Amino acid sequence: MLSIQPIPRALVPVNSDAAQRLSDRNYDEFQGDEEIWNRLQVAPDSILRVTMAHCATPNVDALIQDGSPEALARSTANMNALAGGSDTREVEDALWIYEITSPARPGIRQIGLGCMAATAQIRTAETPEGTIIRNEGIREKKAAGRAKLIQATQSYIGVVNNAFEDHDGATTAALEALADARPADFTVIDEKGNTHRSWLETDAAVIADLTTRMASVRCAYVADGNHRSAAAAHLGRSHFLTVFFPTDRMGLLPYNRLVSTLTVATAGQANRTEAFLAALSADFEYCACDTVPELDLHEIGLYLDGQWTKLTAQAHTYDAANAVEVIDADIVQRRIFDHLMGITDARDPQLTFVGGDRPADYLAARVDAGEFEFALLMAPVTMQQIVDVCEQDRFMPPKSTWFEPKIRIGLVIALF
């Protein structure tokens, strides 16, 4: 059962205009530091000046090392300026109703409950009965880096995205009723046209009701933010900042790959495309496509030498009873990268991961420009696949889930 509590000290924008200026995408939605620096040139008030202070420099050649003492000092100074400025205010003991609507998902209200969740409820080897289940393993270096930022700013800025199954829809309906009863405290429209609305709830009776409702939830699944929750535990903090969204309201896009090398045996083949497809044929059926292929589960789009090809994984490439092995990212890693190319580490620098918010044409253009040898396109994983992996106490393949729309950071910050 989930144990939640209100945010003791919430730092929030004073109005929608301030929220529009301050809030932004999370750091891992950008393709590198230069893209973050470019964002800060057009949005100098962005929360990125705190979370990615090493990019808040006068020119792009002056970037400093992320996580360095200098960068952390800048994060501290910029956070203090934000908290002491006229664009923010403090709210005590508040829950946060958060809704995201997207033009790409008409008619769907992704509405959830923002709160503090207990780090003691995160499921680990030491706490196997934990009710908050991670979907990936934790890299200590990454968690420690997030912990340093939390410590420097004395706050939680990054929000952990948790999913829960609302089987009868009653909690979702309660959140919608509260949201529909009054105007949002602030509204933001992001770069993709998604609308983010926030309602701060401080009424004791409402808080008690929502806390009771969440206590009836058997478990939750970490969707985004495994390392942010791990950082809180690393610091010995009792709680972390999160939003719980119903699983049936969440959206997923593909997580694709760009590959910088292609090593296949070419003997007896007219060209390397033929050679690669011949090597793949032991595990995949394939057919050429005139355009970007439409993909279902276990179908992979390959872009090589100006040609799209649809690959279909054969049944022997996965164990249907293993919730991880049926995921396409795992099939690709095992049967193409590992078995065929000798790339045994899913985070090998030869692989570049591209979220599904970038179109297939973007991948093809990077290959055509000679930056990469080929691209792989996949269908998005399903929310049920993620639940199945968590319920088997397994971890999702690295870089396999891209939730969209994503949580906007800077809308609600939990101060220590």
Image: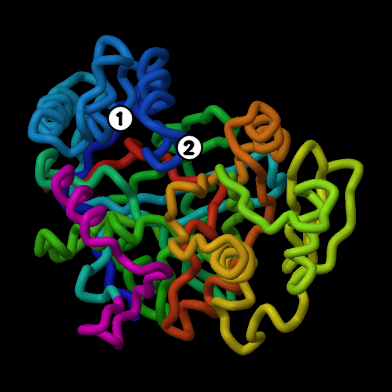
Does residue 139 belong to the magenta stretch?
A: yes
Viewer-side residue, 404 vs 99: 404
Disc assigned to residue 183? 2
Disc assigned to residue 139? none
Question: Residue visible at 26% across and 53% down?
Answer: 142
In the rendered image, residue 233, in percent from the top left (x then y), is placed at 17, 64
Q: Quadrant of residue 119?
A: bottom left
Lateral position of residue 357 relative to residue 214, left or right: right
Task: Answer above or below: position of 313 versus 250.
Answer: below
Give the SS element for disc 1: loop
> Given the image, on which type of amino acid does mark 2 rest?
Pro
Viewer-side residue, 268 vs 221: 268
Q: Which residues are magenta?
A: 123-150
Which residue is disc 1 drawn over? 47
> Given the image, on which type of amino acid does mark 1 rest?
Ile
In the rendered image, residue 258, in percent from the top left (x then y), is placed at 59, 44
Real-space Cα separation, disc 1 to disc 2, in angstroms:
24 Å
> Can residue 187 be seen?
yes
In the rendered image, residue 13, in percent from the top left (x then y), is placed at 30, 30
First along the sequence among labels 1 and 2: 1
